[in-house]
Image (spheres, helix red, strand yellow):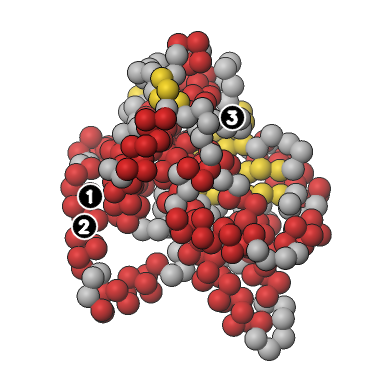
């Protein structure tokens, strides 16, 4: 396994940039990473008093917990298919170790720790409670959580060998979302960790980079690999949206996150309508159903690391009504008061 794993989630779609830009450790919105993956969560509306952000105490009815949850229980079929293809490629483990070493790890770790606030029971305790609860629901060890000042709503995950993985959320995301939405974003990020997506993001980056160095057909091979990888990335995002739903346990919460990331702002948040956004998604499907529309749709999404927000909203709405999702809910148990504490 490669020593460094980087997985970024932010419900906006990103076009690719060079792999080297991600090695320059530009964390911002992580649009510089070729393989950014979106994740979104939200708070109740925040209020500013005396220049400080104040948030009401987090309270939620006891959610369902999935004690024996496996990643394949909610993994999207396209994610399963493309992950198997990546696992079948020989030499990725050794290549990752050769190109990503301890110096790279340390730079990325210190860069983030030095510019963010570590969340704990004594520092932003409500955020801490949300992360602990979301991790318990998904049956995964909770990572560290950091809050970083940024005007770009985003969240991402870093996993470094031998060290505890951590999730970073931007302050603008906290201000944009409700508390339940914010927890859904945290769950989306946890989904990447649960499914080991970061491992394959790193390996795929290296694989594509190496293909460009092959004489002759190298550029064509690299482009083909990139397109296949983006298909997997978009499927991986759909998987993590399902993880968000398993924690939120209300499809409208997850869809609201996607809607706000597509075109929301704090001053208009109370005017946004989830049902109208789903109708918009159906309109997009109808408009792209013709041969010309299908071609334009593929051209529009081929170089995106994330599916379009309207398509993600439609996907999560359909999965929330599926027998697969209902079966998972039947297996779940109620989280008790002790576990929540």
Residue 339 pos. (x, y %): 51, 15
**What residue appears at the point 39 percent right and 23 percent down from the top-left corner?**
63
Asked if disc 2 and disc 1 are in contact, CB closer than 8 Å, the reply is yes
Q: Is residue 230 left or right of residue 308?
A: right
Distance from label 2 to label 3 (Cα)? 36 Å
The residue identified by callout 3 is 142
Residue 42 pos. (x, y %): 39, 34
Q: Residues within 10 Å of mark 1 (few under 14, many from 20)?
A: many
Q: For mark 1, give the secondary structure.
A: helix
Q: Residues within 10 Å of mark 2 (few under 14, many from 20)?
A: some
Q: For mark 3, give the secondary structure.
A: loop
The residue identified by callout 1 is 278
**What residue appears at the point 20 percent right and 39 percent down from the top-left corner?**
271
Q: For mark 2, give the secondary structure.
A: helix
Depth check: 256 or 79 in front?
A: 79
Could you tell me if residue 107 is visible in this image? no
The residue identified by callout 2 is 282
| Of the image marks 3 and 1, the number of the one nearer the N terminus | 3
Q: Residues within 10 Å of mark 3 (few under 14, many from 20)?
A: many
Q: Is residue 122 above or below residue 278?
A: above
**What residue appears at the point 29 percent right and 74 percent down from the top-left corner?**
294
Residue 293 pos. (x, y %): 26, 74
Depth check: 146 or 208 in front?
A: 208
Q: Is residue 8 left or right of residue 109?
A: left
Residue 101 pos. (x, y %): 80, 52
Could you tell me if residue 298 is visible in this image? yes
**What residue appears at the point 64 percent right and 70 percent down from the top-left corner?**
208
Residue 163 lies in what quarter of the image? top right
């Amino acid at each position: 396994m490669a020593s460094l794993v980087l997985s970024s989630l932010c419900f906006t779609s990103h076009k690719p940039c060079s792999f080297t830009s991600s090695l320059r450790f530009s964390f911002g919105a992580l649009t510089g990473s070729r393989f950014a993956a979106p994740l979104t969560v939200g708070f109740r509306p925040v209020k500013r008093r005396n220049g400080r952000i104040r948030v009401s105490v987090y309270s939620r009815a006891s959610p369902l917990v999935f004690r024996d949850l496996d990643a394949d229980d909610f993994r999207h079929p396209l994610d399963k298919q493309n992950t198997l293809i990546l696992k079948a490629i020989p030499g990725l483990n050794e290549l990752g170790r050769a190109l990503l070493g301890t110096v790279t790890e340390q730079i990325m770790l210190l860069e983030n720790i030095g510019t963010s606030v570590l969340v704990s029971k004594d520092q932003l305790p409500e955020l801490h409670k949300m992360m602990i609860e979301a991790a318990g629901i998904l049956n995964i060890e909770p990572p560290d959580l950091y809050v970083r000042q940024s005007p770009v709503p985003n969240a991402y995950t870093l996993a470094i060998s031998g060290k505890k993985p951590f999730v970073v959320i931007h302050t603008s995301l906290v201000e944009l979302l409700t508390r339940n939405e914010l927890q859904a974003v945290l769950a989306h990020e946890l989904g990447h960790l649960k499914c080991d997506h970061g491992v394959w993001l790193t390996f795929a980056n290296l694989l594509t980079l190496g293909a460009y160095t092959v004489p002759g057909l190298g550029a064509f091979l690299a482009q083909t690999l990139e397109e296949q990888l983006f298909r997997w990335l978009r499927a991986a995002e759909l998987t993590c949206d399902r993880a968000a739903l398993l924690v939120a346990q209300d499809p409208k919460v997850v869809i609201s996150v996607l809607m706000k990331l597509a075109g929301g702002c704090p001053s208009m948040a109370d005017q946004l309508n989830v049902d109208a956004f789903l109708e918009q998604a159906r309109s997009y499907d109808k408009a792209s159903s013709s041969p010309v529309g299908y071609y334009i749709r593929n051209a529009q999404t081929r170089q995106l690391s994330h599916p379009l927000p309207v398509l993600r909203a439609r996907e999560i709405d359909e999965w929330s009504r599926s027998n697969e999702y209902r079966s998972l809910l039947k297996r779940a148990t109620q989280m008790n008061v002790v576990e929540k504490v």
